[in-house]
Amino acid sequence: MSDADDTVVSLQDVEVHFEEDDSLLGLFSEPDTVHAVDGVSLDISENDVVALVGESGCGKTTLGKAAIGMRRPTGGSVRYRGQDIWDAKDGRGDVTVPYQDIRKALQIIHQDPGSALNPYRMVKNNLEEPLKRWQKDLSDEDRTARILHLLETVGMAPPEDYAERYPHQLSGGEKQRVALIRSLLMNPDLILADESVSALDVSLRVEMMDLMLELQDQFDTSYLFISHDLSNARYITEKADGRIGIMYLGKLVEIGPPEQILNDPQHPYTKALRWSSPDLRIDPSDDELPMRKIDIPDPIDPPSGCRFHTRCPVAREACKGETPEAFPVDDSSDHGAACYRVLENHEYWESQPLDNTEDEQTYRKQFGD
């Protein structure tokens, strides 16, 4: 684990709840509260790579946006180098890091790079915009030189040609490179890469992730990498000596180095995700999904206790009580899992299974205890 001095962003018990109103103009019922993120703590250090993985709707993107100050949490705190981001924005207390500095230090690459690029402006003009806003002391010549240098660095040569193109004249991979350049122009401490390679072909995904890591070395930045694909998360975290975090229904249920998450997963949901990635299966012949049902519970009314217990093949009565915290695995500070099965002497082992004897036998056959 990293020292507190090199922690870039620290999330403590972060909650993000928002209201969803499906009624006609909201006249006939109270809006429902969606528990998008519920009590997540996570530290991201300098030159760190953390990949968050989970099914659609698990809260990983919402958590990522909270981490870079794009989404105000409804509970808990988000700090940049010790400064609460929202205290800085609202001017509360003794602000040690100005909000403008925080904005520059925390950047994002969207899944759709076109959303960050004005289709009516050339690449050069799209990239000049943040420089003109945040680095007003740069001359026109300095801005142009920096943009051309970065275009060439990411393999878009000759850079003068690409600088004069419009977004529609670029391929998907080239648009993503421009979006990466745009985020790096601010010399950020942390970049949220929100499904930034999911729309690319497999070969281009690897190429893009390699480029991100190459530029990480040059710019001393960190990545919070969001993906629904465990294979992508494995690739980038293995090369960067990073961590994989597994999210389920607003909770961070397991986190640790990729070799431990993939080779020694402790949470049943992590094992299900590994099963759903055929190239990561221990036994490719296993054809039974290690979950009791497919449907994810409603985040408006999440299950009590462990939120995965309604789908878990080894859930017991104890799983319906209090929500498990992240317990260290084998006294390791780097690998934690929010599952009572990690604890040898927990009451879980004495409580009754939730009417899933057949499921538990299948689970044990595939994964062991």
Image (cartoon, grey):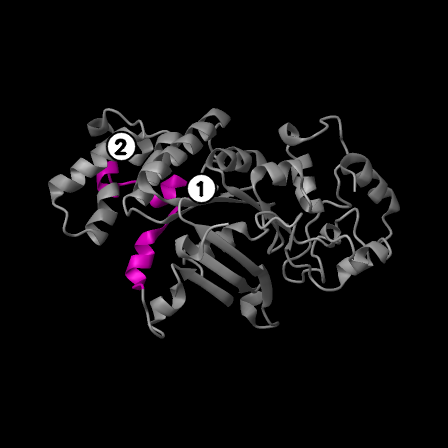
Taking the image as shown, residue 91 lies to the left or right of residue 112, namely: left
Q: Earlier in the sequence, mark 1 or mark 2?
A: 1
SS of the residue under disc 1 = loop
Q: Which region of the structure is painted magenta?
A: 97-126
Q: Residues within 10 Å of mark 1 (few under 14, many from 20)?
A: many
Q: Is the residue 212 above or below the residue 248 in the image?
A: above
Residue type (three-letter) at the residue carrying disc 1: Gln
Query: Can residue 229 be seen by looking at this rendering?
Result: no
Foreground: disc 1 or disc 2: 2
Give residue 316's quadrant in the image: bottom right
Q: Position of residue 344 (x, y in %)?
A: 77, 52
Q: Residue visible at 47% across and 24% down? A: 203
Is residue 119 among the parts visible in the rendering?
Answer: yes
Q: Residue at x 22, y 33 (%)?
A: 149
Q: Which residue is under mark 2?
A: 151
Separation (CA) of disc 1 from disc 2: 20 Å
Above or below: residue 176 compared with residue 360: above
Estimate the x, y position of residue 126 in percent, counting from the top left: 26, 42
Q: Residue furthest bottom?
A: 93
Secondary element under disc 2, as helix, strand or loop, is helix
Residue in front for this viewpoint, 304 or 338 = 338
Q: Is residue 103 magenta?
A: yes
Residue holding disc 1: 111
Which of the numbered marks, if any, corresponds to residue 343?
none
Between 112 and 209, the one lying in front of the other is: 209
Residue 327 within the segment the image draws in magenta: no
